[in-house]
Image (cartoon, rainbow, N blue to C red):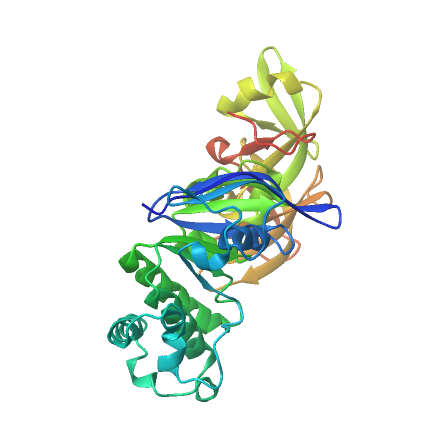
Amino acid sequence: MAEIIVEHATKSFGGKRAIDDVSLTVSDGEFLVLLGPSGCGKTTLLRAIAGLGLVDSGRISIDGRDVTYLPPGDRKISMVFQSYAIFPHMSVRNNIGFGLRMTKAPKELIDERVGEAAELLHIEELLDRKPSAMSGGQRQRVAVARALAMKAEVLLMDEPLSNLDALLRLEMRAELKRLLSEVNATTMYVTHDQIEALSMGDRIAVMKDGVLQQVERPSVVYENPANEFVGGFIGNPPMNFLDGVVGCVDGRVSVALAGQPMPVGSASAALDRFDGQAIRLGMRAENMEALHAPASDALRVRVAVVEPLGSQNLLTVTLGSDGTTGQPLKISTHPTFTASVGQELWIRFPSDQIRWIDPQTGTVLDS
C-alpha cells in the first residue's frame, strides 16, 4: 500500500506562504494531478513530499511511514523532473540504470530492469545512444524509464512534458497515461496545463496561492467548480462570468443581466437571500444555445468576434440592454451556425447549466 497523506503542511519563503495548511490524501495506485498557475505552490508541495524541501509544519506520510523529515533516498520514491536531468556523457542504458547502481543492485537485476523500462517506453533501440543524439521526446522517455526502473511504489512528476512542442506533448500525454495505468504506481503529477490535468488524472487538486481550492474527479471539477477561480482557470475558453441583480416578485425569482430579466428555474431557493443584491452567473461556452430569432427565454446579444475553429465556431458577443454594449461572453456553436460581426443574436441559458456565485466570496452556491 503506497498511500500518500499530507496533513496541515505549511511552507514559507521570505514571509510568503508557498503552501498554506494543505491536507491531501492520494490513494494507493491513484493518479492525482496538482494543477494551478505558476507560483501557486504545487511544485513546492511535490518537493516537500519528495524530501527535496522540508515543510515548516505539518506531517507527510508514505505507505504508513512518517517521512516528514526523512532524506529523499529513504522515502522509496522515484521522481521525473521538468528538465529531464539525464547525464549527457552516459548512454541511455547507463542513464536508466543509474539509480539502481547507486543502490548497489546486482548487475543482473539492473540489466533486467533497464530492459523492462526501455521496452515499456519503446526505446530499446536507443540503449547505446547518447542523449545528444536524441530528440526532446526521446530524452523525456529516458527520464521516465529511469524512474520506472526503480520500481518505486510512488512516482512524482514535475511538469515532465512542458519542454516538448505541442504535437509531441499530445503523443506523450497519451503514452504516459497508458504507461502509468500498467505500472499501477501511486502518482502525483504537477502541471499548469489544464488539458493534461483533465485528460490524465483520476483526480485533480487545484491550487491557488498555496491553498487547495478543490480536489475532485476531472469531470466534477470542470462541470461543478467549487468557486470562480476554478471555473475561470479550467476550460478553453474559460467559464463565462456575468454580473446580475436578483429580484423576487410575487414569489418568483429572476435575475436581471444587463437590464434583461432571466428566469432562474430550480435555483430560486438558493437565490432568495440575494433579493435586491448582486449575483454572479457562471456558464460554459458550450452550454449556451445561440438562436437567430427572438425567444421568450433568451437574451439579446450582438456579435463582436467570430472565430472559426474547425470543429466549432467561437463567438464573442456583448450582452446589454440594447444588445450593443455591456458584458462580453464567449459562446461555442456548431461550425454550420452562421454569424457575422455586428449581427444580433439571442442566447438561451439552460438553467441546469448555470453556476450561481456569491460575488463576495467567489464560492459557487448549492442549487
Residue 285 seen in the figure:
yes
Q: Residue at x 33, y 49 (%)?
A: 29
Q: Residue at x 50, y 51 (%)?
A: 70
Write down the quadrant of residue 57 in the picture.
top right
Write down the quadrant of residue 212 in the picture.
top right
- Quadrant of the image containing the N terminus: top left
The mark total stands at 0
Q: Is residue 182 above or below residue 275?
A: below
In this orientation, which residue lies closer to the viewer: 360 or 63? Answer: 63
Q: Residue furthest top?
A: 250
In this orientation, which residue lies closer to the viewer: 328 or 58? Answer: 58
Write down the quadrant of residue 256 in the picture.
top right
Residue 41 location (% of width, % of height): 61, 50
Q: Residue at x 44, y 55 (%)?
A: 74
Residue 103 location (% of width, % of height): 38, 67
In this orientation, which residue lies closer to the viewer: 87 or 292? Answer: 87
Residue 253 location (% of width, % of height): 59, 19
Residue 128 location (% of width, % of height): 35, 87
Left or right: residue 287 versus residue 207 is left
Residue 335 seen in the figure:
no
Left or right: residue 203 versus residue 281 is left
Q: Is residue 93 above or below residue 308?
A: below
Left or right: residue 93 versus residue 238 is left
Q: Is residue 147 above or below residue 276?
A: below
Q: Residue at x 51, y 56 (%)?
A: 71
